[in-house]
């Protein structure tokens, strides 16, 4: 006798299962979609506003003092992280506290009527109950303030698109506050970066000024030189440097720019000095060697002349930065009011609910069919095998199943204690 082939699941069985229990599947998908949609409506919303800021490479370098201030003229792949850290540097704790006080981020705003959400209300009640029961001890005011600052800082996201372009965004639960805070951050970043550049140049200028005062006191104690204070080799080097800077600036500015005018005037003075030295038949034109006793004095005068030139260049650079602050930054994307919430997405939650309800109902139906088939009901089994049903075995109580069953043809057993 051949064994019956084991049944396998086919597409026909799946379609029959769906058709048989279509009502349950429909109800599961409907309730799943409704439940997830309501959850998406009740969950706290998050809005995101961003702007894309491009920092011109001129901000990090200057044609006048690029070789003198290397930290402003660095280049390479590693500068992206350095410039990103420069932007994060302006987000100081004082600014974060001022931003939170201005827009009521650390606590509810007094001038804004906002009803707390169900989640916030339940969280506040649970926290108060835990404090009263002694299960939770709130931290100190300073620790709470530090945690609030850290939370606010995590809401400000800075991504480097390339070495000079950055995407800066802010995430919050209120769309109006999100938009206003993002605009405030946008203005603060530009203003702070400009102040940082001017402050750096001013510090270098002040350091040069102090060094010039020291050299001036040393020059006053030296005897007056018998020849011109600036020898021809130093004048030629300075003239070559001035002309190089003129060529660099001419590519960006017109001849009416104050830097170009001052450099041209310096070029004219140096050229006249060199021409007069060459025409004059004097020790200056012959270029005699400097006596050993005057070596230190000539070096001091040369250092004083070089620092004076760079001091003037720094003054020009600072004045130019104050007059042309908008040349260093370009706004590729301005902050825009959020049209919809970043999270939760209603359509996404509805799709998740539909899939969860449908597949959950299908799983329940499959389990139902599996256990219904494995129960071996007599009527269903007889119908599937095509045989007649003779009867069903009785279910005996436990007291009777413990005694041995009688054997056909055996003599009856005597009960103990009876004759």
Image: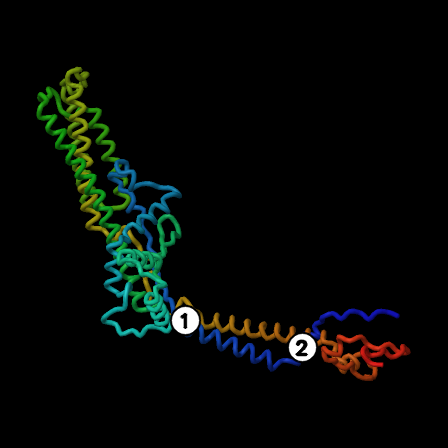
Q: Residue at left 20%, top 41%?
A: 203
Q: Is residue 189 above or below residue 365?
A: above
| 192 to the left or right of 150 | left
Q: Is residue 207 above or below residue 392?
A: above
Looking at the rendering, in which quadrant would you find the C terminus? bottom right
Q: Residue at left 84%, top 69%?
A: 3
Check disc 1 and report its element: helix, strand or loop. loop
Q: Is residue 125 above or below residue 166?
A: below
Mark 2 vs mark 1: which is more N-terminal? 2
Label 2 neighbour load within 10 Å: few <14, some 14-19, many 20+: some
Q: Which mark is residue 17?
A: 2
* Pointer 2 with pointer 1, Cβ within 8 A: no
Q: Residue 176 appears at what percent x and percent y?
A: 30, 69
| 221 to the left or right of 75 | left
Residue 256 shows up from this direction: no
Q: Quadrant of residue 412?
A: bottom right
Q: Nearest the camera: 386 or 281?
A: 386
Tell me the CA gap for discs 2 and 1.
Answer: 36 Å
Name the residue beneath numbered marker 1.
43
| 273 to the left or right of 189 | left
């Amino acid at each position: 006798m051949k064994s019956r082939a084991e049944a396998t699941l086919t597409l026909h069985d799946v379609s029959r299962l769906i058709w048989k229990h279509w009502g349950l599947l429909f109800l599961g998908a409907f309730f799943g979609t409704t439940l997830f949609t309501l959850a998406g409506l009740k969950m706290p919303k998050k809005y995101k506003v961003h702007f894309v800021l491009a920092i011109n490479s001129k901000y990090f370098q200057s044609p006048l003092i690029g070789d003198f201030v290397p930290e402003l003229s660095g280049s390479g792949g590693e500068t992206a992280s350095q410039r990103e850290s420069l932007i994060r540097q302006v987000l100081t704790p004082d600014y974060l506290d001022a931003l939170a006080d201005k827009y009521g981020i650390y606590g509810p705003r007094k001038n804004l009527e906002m009803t707390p959400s169900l989640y916030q209300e339940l969280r506040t009640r649970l926290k108060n109950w835990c404090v009263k029961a002694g299960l939770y001890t709130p931290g100190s005011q300073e620790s709470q303030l530090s945690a609030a600052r850290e939370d606010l800082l995590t809401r400000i996201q800075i991504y480097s698109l390339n070495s000079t372009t950055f995407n800066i965004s802010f995430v919050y639960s209120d769309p109006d506050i999100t938009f206003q805070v993002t605009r405030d951050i946008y203005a603060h970043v530009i203003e702070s970066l400009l102040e940082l550049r001017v402050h750096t140049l001013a510090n270098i200028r002040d350091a040069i000024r102090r060094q010039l005062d020291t050299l001036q006191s040393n020059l006053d104690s030296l005897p007056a030189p018998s020849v011109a204070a600036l020898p021809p080799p130093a004048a030629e080097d300075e003239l070559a440097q001035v002309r190089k800077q003129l060529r660099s600036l001419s590519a960006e500015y017109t001849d009416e720019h104050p830097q170009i005018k001052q450099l041209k005037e310096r070029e004219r003075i140096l050229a006249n000095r060199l021409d007069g030295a060459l025409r004059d038949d004097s020790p200056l034109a012959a270029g005699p060697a400097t006596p050993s006793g005057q070596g230190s004095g000539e070096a001091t005068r040369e250092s004083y002349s070089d620092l004076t030139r760079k001091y003037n260049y720094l003054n020009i650079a600072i004045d130019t930065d104050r007059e042309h602050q908008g040349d260093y930054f370009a706004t590729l994307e301005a902050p825009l009011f959020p049209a919809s919430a970043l999270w939760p997405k209603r359509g996404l939650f509805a799709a998740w609910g539909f899939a969860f309800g449908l597949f959950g109902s299908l799983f329940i139906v499959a389990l139902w069919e599996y256990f219904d088939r494995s129960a071996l009901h007599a009527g269903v089994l007889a119908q599937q095998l095509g045989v007649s049903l003779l009867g069903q075995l009785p279910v005996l109580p436990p007291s009777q199943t413990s005694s041995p069953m009688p054997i056909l043809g055996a003599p009856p057993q005597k009960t103990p204690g009876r004759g």
